[in-house]
């Protein structure tokens, strides 16, 4: 391999690292909806809430998409990050096959991650525990729920402080027949917006 080809491979490898890093930033930034409440904020400030959310998805619901992500996320990520980079000027049937295989590995990580996020986004308001009892504002509570979902995508095996988790679980109660705190907040916000619109139209 000559020096120019080696340089190209190194640069291509850096581009792949950037692709994976951009995916991580997408998880941290896209999901927080303009609020400083991304995964890292939740890991640091509500670690017990993150773990309880993960346990709810994977043990209480036994949601197959969430379980698959928890069990396979690290393997998918590692495969994407270590997939070989094949220079575009290399030719041959085996080279084309290897290039396609490497691209498929990287694409799978992103595709499965986005599918999982979309699914978690659809069911997250069913989370029955108010792990943010100190937050009264409904929009803020929903923003934090977005952060919980993003935290699960970022690190579905997050453990945190087990003593805090047990203490938090002992505090939490919920009525399975009632709306969840997040469903109530979504309804409250919707009703408030409808009322504001009706006032504007008077």
Image (cartoon, rainbow, N blue to C red):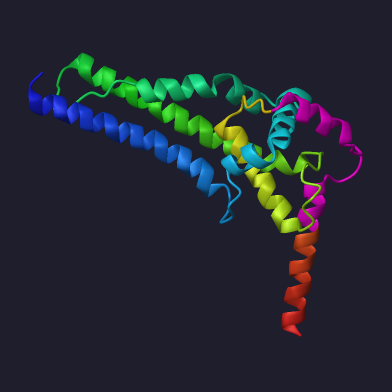
Q: Is residue 73 left or right of residue 103?
A: right
- Any magenta on residue 171? yes
Q: Is residue 37 visible?
A: yes
Q: Quadrant of residue 41?
A: top right
Please name the residue shown 70% across and 27% down the image. Answer: 161
Please name the residue shown 92% across and 40% down the image. Answer: 177
Q: Is residue 17 left or right of residue 7?
A: right
Residue 24 image position (x, y, % from top left): 47, 38
Please name the residue shown 55% across and 35% down the image. Answer: 115
- Any magenta on residue 46? no
Q: Is residue 179 above or below residue 95?
A: below
Name, please, the residue furthest toward the top: 94
Residue 118 image position (x, y, % from top left): 59, 40
Please name the residue shown 77% across and 30% down the image. Answer: 164
Q: What secondary structure do most residues of the magenta stretch adopt?
A: helix
Quadrant, the N terminus: top left
Q: How many marks?
A: 0
Q: Is residue 19 above or below residue 109?
A: below
Q: Quadrant of residue 197?
A: bottom right
Quadrant, the C terminus: bottom right
Q: Which residues lie in the magenta part?
A: 161-187
Q: Quadrant of residue 69?
A: top right
Residue 103 image position (x, y, % from top left): 34, 26
Q: Is residue 118 visible?
A: no
């Amino acid at each position: 391999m000559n020096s120019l080809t080696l340089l190209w491979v190194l640069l291509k490898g850096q581009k792949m690292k950037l692709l994976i890093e951009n995916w991580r930033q997408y998880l941290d930034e896209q999901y927080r909806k303009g609020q400083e409440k991304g995964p890292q904020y939740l890991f640091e400030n509500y670690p017990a809430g993150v773990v309880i959310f993960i346990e709810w998805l994977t043990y209480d619901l036994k949601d197959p998409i969430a379980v698959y992500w928890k069990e396979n996320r690290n393997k998918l990520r590692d495969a994407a990050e270590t997939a070989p980079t094949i220079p575009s000027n290399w030719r041959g049937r085996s080279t084309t096959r290897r290039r396609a295989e490497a691209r498929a590995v990287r694409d799978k990580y992103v595709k499965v991650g986005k599918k999982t996020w979309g699914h978690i986004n659809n069911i997250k308001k069913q989370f029955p525990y108010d792990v943010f009892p100190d937050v009264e504002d409904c929009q803020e509570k929903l923003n934090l729920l977005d952060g919980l979902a993003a935290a699960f995508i970022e690190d579905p095996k997050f453990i945190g402080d087990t003593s805090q988790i047990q203490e938090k679980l002992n505090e939490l109660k919920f009525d399975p027949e009632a709306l969840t705190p997040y469903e109530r907040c979504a309804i409250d916000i919707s009703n408030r917006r409808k009322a504001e619109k009706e006032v504007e139209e008077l």
